Image (tube, coloured by chain):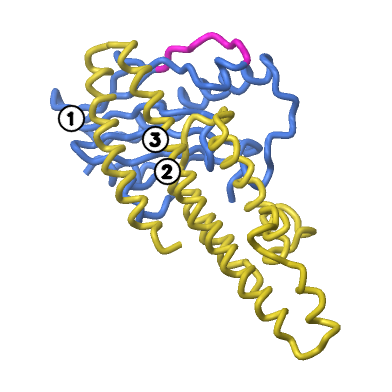
Chain colours: A blue, B yellow
Amino acid sequence: MIQDVTQPETETIDTRYVQTRVEDWVSRLNALYSDLTAWLPPGYRAEQSQGVTMNEEMMRKYGVQPRQLPVLNVLEGDVWKAKVIPFGLWVIGANGRLDVLVGDKKKIIVGGERDEEAPTWRIASNDGRSTLKKLNRESWIETLQ
Amino acid sequence: MKLVAQILATFNEIDSHLTKIYDIAINANDSVAQQAIADKRVLTENAFFVLLWGQLENEINERVEKLIAAGSSESKFETRRLFYNLDPDRMKFEDRLALAADKQAGPGSAWKKAITYYGLRNNIAHGNSDRSGVSFLTVVPDFYDIQSKLIS
C-alpha cells in the first residue's frame, strides 16, 4: 500500500514539519548506508566522499535550507562497482527513493511507510517489469552481482 | 491501460539518459549541473505520471460509459430512468468515479486511492505539485489494483 495514497499527509505542513521530515530522511539514509556497508561481501568497501544537494520543492516552498546528502560508492578493491544516490523524499508512491547504479544498470530503493517502528526499504530493477522486494543482505548482494 | 508498457519503456529510455548525465555531474562535483538535471528529472517523472494516470482514467471512463449504456437500456423503467440524465462527457471526474467505485469505502479502497492520485495528477497538471518525483514501481501496480477493483 502506498502511504501517500492511503494516508495522505494530514499534519499541518509548515517549515517545522518539512524540517522534521528532512531530518528523518537524513537519519534513515545514514542507517541505510550503515546497513549496506555492513552487508558488503569480503573484498568490497564503501566510501561517501561524493554528495548531492537536497533542495526539493517542499523545502523551497517552506523556506527550508538545502541539505548536502552523501552518495555511497561501492568498490571491489579499487574497482568501482555501484553508486547509491538519494533521489528524493517527497516522491509519489514512496516515503523517499534512492537510485542505485550498478555498471550501466539502474535499480531503485524505496522507503516504507512513515509509521513503521523501524524503517524498511525495498529494491528492484527500474525496468518497468520488476517487482519490489525487501532490501536485506541477500537482495543487496544480488544487486551487486 | 493499453499503453502502460509503452509509456514506461519510453520513460526508462529518457530516464537512463538523465541518470547518466546526473552521474557525470556528481563525479564532477558540479552542483549547478546537478540541480538543473534534478529539476529536469522531476519534470519528466511528473509528466509521465500524468500520462500513466490518463491510462487509468480512460479505464474508469470506459467502465462508466458501459454502465450508463446498460442502465439506459434496462427494461424496467424504474431502473432506466436513473440513467437518462447521466452524460459521461459532462460529468466531473469524481461523479464518474462514484459510479465505478464505492465512495464510502475506507483507506486502501479503489475510491480513496483513485481520488488521491487524481489530486496529485491535478497538482502536476496545473503546475502546483510539491512532489519530487514518482516511484513507478509502486504507483503502476497500484493503478492496476484500482483497475481490478472497479465495479462494472
Check residue A111 in the rendering and tell me which mark sits there, or answer none.
none
Residue A67 located left or right of residue B61: left
Q: Is residue A38 above or below residue B97?
A: above
Q: Amino acid at mark 2?
A: Phe
Is the magenta region chiefly helix, strand or loop? Answer: loop
Is the residue under label 2 in contact with that under label 3 (CB below 8 Å)? yes
* Whole-percent x, y for residue A82 in the image: 24, 32
Check residue B48 in the rendering and tell me which mark sits there, or answer none.
2
* Whole-percent x, y for residue B18 in the image: 28, 31
Q: Amino acid at mark 1?
A: Glu
Between marks 3 and 2, how big is the CA–CA gap?
A: 6 Å
* Tag 3 subunit: B
Instruction: Judge if badges 3 and 2 mark residues of a common chain.
Output: yes
The stretch in magenta equals A62-69
User: What residue is pinned by disc 3?
Assistant: B44
Q: Quadrant of residue B90?
A: bottom right
Number of residues whose C-alpha sits closer than 10 Å to that of mark 1, classed few (under 14), some (14–19) or many (20 or more): some
Q: Is residue B90 visible?
A: yes
Residue A36 sits inside the magenta stretch: no
Q: Quadrant of residue B78?
A: bottom right
Q: Nearer the viewer, mark 1 or mark 3?
A: 3
Q: Residue at x 48, y 57 (%)?
A: B55
* Tag 2 subunit: B
